[in-house]
Image (cartoon, coloured by chain):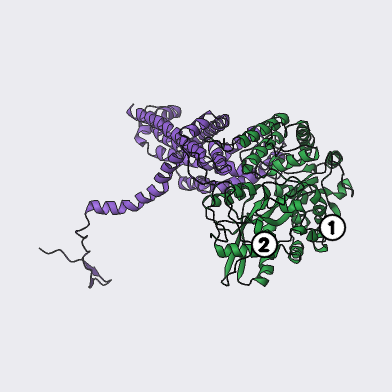
Chain colours: A green, B purple
Amino acid sequence: MTACGGSEDGAGQGSAPKAPATIPELTKDPLTLSFVWFAWPPAQALEKFANEEYRKVRPNATIKVNTVPNANWHDAMFTQFAARKTDFDIAILDSQHIGEAVTNGNILDLTDFVKNNIDVNAYDPYLLAAYGQFPQAETGRRDENASLYGLPLLGDTWTMIYRKDLIGDQAPQTWDEMISAAQKCQTDHPGVSGLAFHQANGSDAAAVTYNTVNGVYGGNLWDAKAKKIEGVLNDAAGQEAMDVLVNRMKPLTAKGSGNWFIDEVNAAVAQGKACIAFNWIAASGGLLDPKQSTLGKSREEILGKLGFATLPKQKTDLVPLGGMGMHVSAYSAAANQAEALNFMKWFEQADIQKKWAAAGGVPSRTDAIQSPEFLNAGPFNKVYADSVPRMRDMWNVPQYARLVDIENTGVNAALNGAKKPGDALDDIAREQQAVLDASGRKGGGGL
Amino acid sequence: MSDAVPLTTDSSGQVATVTPPARGRSRRLSDRKLAVAFITPALLLLLAMSVFPLLWALYLSFTDYSATRGGSAGFVWFENYIAVLTSAQVHLRALTTLIYVVGAVALQTVLGFTIAYLISRRTHGRGLLTTLFLVPMMLSPVVVGLFWRFMLDAQFGVVNSMLGSLGLEQVEWLTRQRTALASLIVVDTWQWTPFIMLIALAGLTAVPRYLYEAASIDRASEWFKFRTITLPLVWPLLLIAVLFRSIEAFRLFDLVYILTSGGPGVSTETLSFHVYKVAFLGFNTGTASAYGILMVVVVIVLTQLYLRYLNKLKED
């Protein structure tokens, strides 16, 4: 038995070692349970919360959340997986990383563990599937026969942040209304740009932006069953979405914002330089901090100017699924794997999820999402609660890192005038299709 | 006759202590063995850290190995090399790298030599000036990239702020195709011009003064002295500096990573940055190894041609 029950060597397709159905005996010795995540406020919140709360039940355990820059997040985890030795016990993977990690046998199969220890009915099925299931679930659903490789840690989606003092209390309800409001606001208030959103070519920044507009305008990223991207992504709906993004939204952004991501968008909002902005909910807490904002000297004053709303609808009401799950490293020591499973079981309890919500986290259990602790913790939390049934994820396949890079660079090129929007979308679809088609090809892969 | 015994004396000149003679080297350790003992650690380190990885990468370059998928490496012979050499993506990155190398090294050479020439003509404060000019070279490229990223920010950067105060329009330094590559060249030039300056300064100070004195006696003009004395004597040294800088610029990664991430689109992606993506986004280790080996081969071939030119110059 390797570690917590797996017996495979960790190599080859679908060879993720199995975690035991029940938690093995835990060590009484001091133990540090290490996570790896990227550097952002939820990482600090998790370390603080876990050390305060988990140590009440496991005084000998210390939680350490190691962070890396967002752009290095995938590489930091997967280079260690490649070495078959990790300095972390729990990898906080983006939902789209799961396929790569499972296929390479890097994380434990938690299916039996979940059956015995987790109340799966307490979750929205799609949230449970998005952060753990492989092969990928159909949007909005969970395949109960599929294996689970992770459990939700932090739910997330985009929120629309709008200046109530500039465009009014009522948030725009459709994408067209939103663009019109941004246009008018920009014209009426020189020095303030109409829109601020992610455009960078690092991480998944520009890709999520396009995918969001694509979803709202009725497009699809791919035909998952036929593994077809070309002709799907760049169909008429996809082209319309790209046209809206580049020709109607981009002109309303600040000059030089073509490399903006989470921090830059937040900075623009906090400094009063944007009428309407889009950002991840989990990264929006700082906007209410008077020390970081020029919009007011108190949280209430800032809230008098900033509104948070679910994304406007257009042809559909889809919103991007964000957030991450917890996944146990297949190369962690047996005692640490046991502790990791115990932590996950503890973390997914109803009362702990509510405490996590109160501490600034975004829970995934339905009871925690609907709890006053969560809904009252931040003005954007209701946005998350309302967005859960509307979520759509990207591709969760082993080639994810390459697919997202192709889309990021292509959309970024279109946004910054390096390519025509239509050509950029056609190139993205063709290159992504080539990546899917080349899986299993001998030699020359990766170009 | 016995050897003289070395003595030490106190301040009053009287004999204080007798220092024993140094012990002779053990007869068992010959000069050759001593040399081997000194060289071995460095040699082992070189073998372990450079030679072995290079040979291992060479082996992997003929396989379809992936570091994350693991398993055995299947031989694909030259397929990785053919794929790299025939890839339009690689050709695009090669062109970007070429423009970058030529632009950056040419600018650095002109500026570096000019600064060195001006410093060499000063008699006072030469050391201080040289030290000040060397500061950028001593900074980490990541640090340089980060603060230039802030300085070149279109909205909040000091560069655009200065342009604004002069009544000029804001420039999107890092997010437009042409300005992004130019910005990379400018930042690299800011950091590495001192290197060329230093080498050129060494060459300039080594030019014998009597040549200038003889030329002055013949009433030669400054331009004539520069063209016939200074430049020919400094040129070979300058070419060595250009060679070093070209190799460094050819493998540029860090500034691209920090400043533009290869954008907008892929317009500032250099070969090294592309290799990184092939190696770590898809973990196509075999292809990335072939890509890396080809880059090493290109550098070696170009260096050899360059060195031959230098030797020819020396012979002439």
Q: Is mark 2 on a helix, strand or loop?
A: helix
Mark 1, other Cα within 10 Å: few <14 / some 14–19 / many ≥20: few
- The quadrant of the picture occupied by the C terminus of chain A is top right
Pick the residue in front: A94 or B14: A94
The type of residue carrying mark 2 is Met
B83 sits to left or right of B26? right
Q: Mark 2 points at which residue?
A: A344
**Taking A24 as reference, is B290 above or below it?**
above
Instruction: Please tell me how many numbered marks the rendered image carries.
Output: 2
For image coordinates 89% across by 47% down, the residue present is A168
To the question of a shared chain for discs 1 and 2, the answer is yes
- Label placed on residue A301: 1
Task: Determine the image quadrant of residue A300.
Answer: bottom right
For image coordinates 55% across by 63% down, the residue present is A334
**Taking A127 as reference, is B192 above or below it?**
above
B141 sits to left or right of A49? left
- Residue A194 appears anywhere in the view: yes
Q: Is mark 1 on a helix, strand or loop?
A: helix
The type of residue carrying mark 1 is Glu
For image coordinates 68% across by 59% down, the residue present is A114
* Real-space Cα separation, disc 1 to disc 2, in angstroms: 38 Å
How far across and down, in percent of the image, does residue A101 sit?
A: 60, 49
Pick the residue in front: A244 or B305: A244
Indicate the chain on which mark 1 is placed.
A
